[in-house]
Image (cartoon, rainbow, N blue to C red):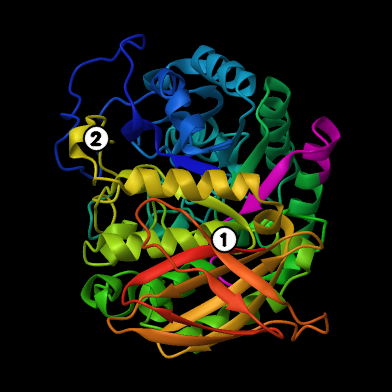
Amino acid sequence: MFYQVFPDRFAPSDRVHKPGNLAPWDSPPTAHGFKGGDLLGVVDRLDYLVDLGINVLYLNPIFSSAANHRYHTYDYFTVDPLLGGNEALRELLDAAHGRGMRVILDGVFNHTGRGFWPFHHLLEAGAASPYRNWFHLDERLDAGRPLFAYPPPETLATELGYNAWWGLPALPKLNTDDPDVREYLFNVAQHWLRFGIDGWRLDVPAEIDDEAFWQEFRARCRAIRPDAYLVGEIWGVAPDWLRGDRFDALMNYPLGEAILGFAGGSRLDMALIAEHHEYQLNVRPTDGPGFAWRVMELAAAYDPDIVAIQFNVIGSHDTPRLRTVFGGDVSSTRFATLLQATLPGAPCIYYGDEVGMTGGLDPDNRRGFPWDPARWEPGLRDTFRALLHLRTAEGALRHGSLRFVAAAGPAAAFERRTDRDRLVIVINPGDATARLELEFGGDGGEPFDGHLEPIDVPGLDAIAPVRVASGRAAIDLRPRSGGILRAE
């Protein structure tokens, strides 16, 4: 179970000295303001995360940067002093590993910040800089004109003199075709694996349009840590990335979007969704049959072993907050988490979703974590905690097969099954009672006879026991209800 931490917004520590000019912790987030969260603050909250059921931390970028999100890297070998520096990461790794947790870092290798020392060298030395081949330049320097790295907002990207990610002057794109650049980046990846991290989440890897780069990246990482976990930020269905020579998993936004559409239904904030570059295309109210079809379509796109370890997200620093997507509805948040915790793949919780944090588009989705429990949505964390611990305890949820046993109207039911265990997940996000006719044994196995006994999950309505005869059963689900049953 992964937990995504946005370091500046998760938890501050008095042990890390901060200069002045920090925004108040509870003030609305801004694009450029810093609030003072740090890595020792994460250390102080590890027991909170262990209790929640988390065993892997995914940290947004932590290297020196002038951006609060730190995707504008200045120094790939130095943890930002505002986060506590390299010593704070050392303490975090030791503390996490001592609790049986792993830690992966966010690697931003397509572009850098303007403060990255080779780019700064280029700004100062111009055409004479030995680092000119590290970036994509036009004829400006050779014509005796300086790069236009700090232009007014109306400046066109073509006037900068260099390629920048999405035309943003603050993000010069690296020339990863250059052997020195490649070697530098591979050394960065290896250095931090030697330091003790457990893997990398790779930012916008498709922007480096070179299979050989990522193949060598994987080989270099595995030479240091044979079990290093590599996950790529790819928003679509992309099985070619998971052939065993590049990444172990992708950020599974397509499954997350299907979950949002089904769990939210009529409660989706479609005006907010229309403002998001991906959600506007892919998130729509979905009924039970539509959800079942989409989940199985996504599962069929990958090898079953890959499906089992996909990085399943239903919210991140790049999306509106889970609860806000649902118009503030808490039941939909619970339903989405029920699905995330019981479908194949590794769930990733975005910090604060478990206590009901809200927030719209970036930067509003990056608020300071409310550590006063009086500000938490009552009972929501208990639901998250129960579901995550259940997933850890139940082998059928981690590596069992997946099959939908019913889907009709607003409702659906699926089973997760191993040779020894069978769990059935039922959900009706609709506003009226829904009847599902469950059918087991359709996979060629013997029809199931017995009982389905409910598993108590705080915050989810109790489901009555179900009698199964000759592989068939009927269940009436109350409006806005869902739960998990165990075959006995």
Q: Nearer the viewer, residue 65 or 277?
A: 277
Where residue 345 sits, quadrant-wise, is bottom right
**Label 1 or label 2, whichever comes before in sequence order:** 1
Quadrant in which the C terminus appears:
bottom right
Query: What residue is shown at x 30% (from left), y 11% (from top)?
Result: 14
Q: Nearer the viewer, residue 78 or 447?
A: 447
How busy is the neighbourhood of tag 2: few (under 14 within 10 Å), some, or many (20 plus)?
some
How busy is the neighbourhood of tag 1: few (under 14 within 10 Å), some, or many (20 plus)?
many
Range of residues picked out in magenta = 219-237
Quadrant in which the N terminus appears:
top right
Task: Based on the picture, tell me whether residue 146 belongs to the magenta stretch.
Answer: no
The amino acid type of the residue labelled 1 equals Thr
Give the residue at mark 1: 342
Tell me if 443 is positioned left or right of 174 in this view. right
Q: Nearer the viewer, residue 275 or 273?
A: 273
Give the residue at mark 2: 370
Tell me if 451 is positioned left or right of 112 in this view. right
The amino acid type of the residue labelled 2 equals Pro
Question: Spatial distance from mark 1 to mark 2, Cα to Cα?
Answer: 27 Å
Query: What residue is shown at x 28% (from left), y 49% (from top)?
Result: 356
Residue 147's spot in the image, x, y percent?
41, 46
Query: What residue is shown at x 73% (from left), y 31% (from top)?
Result: 190
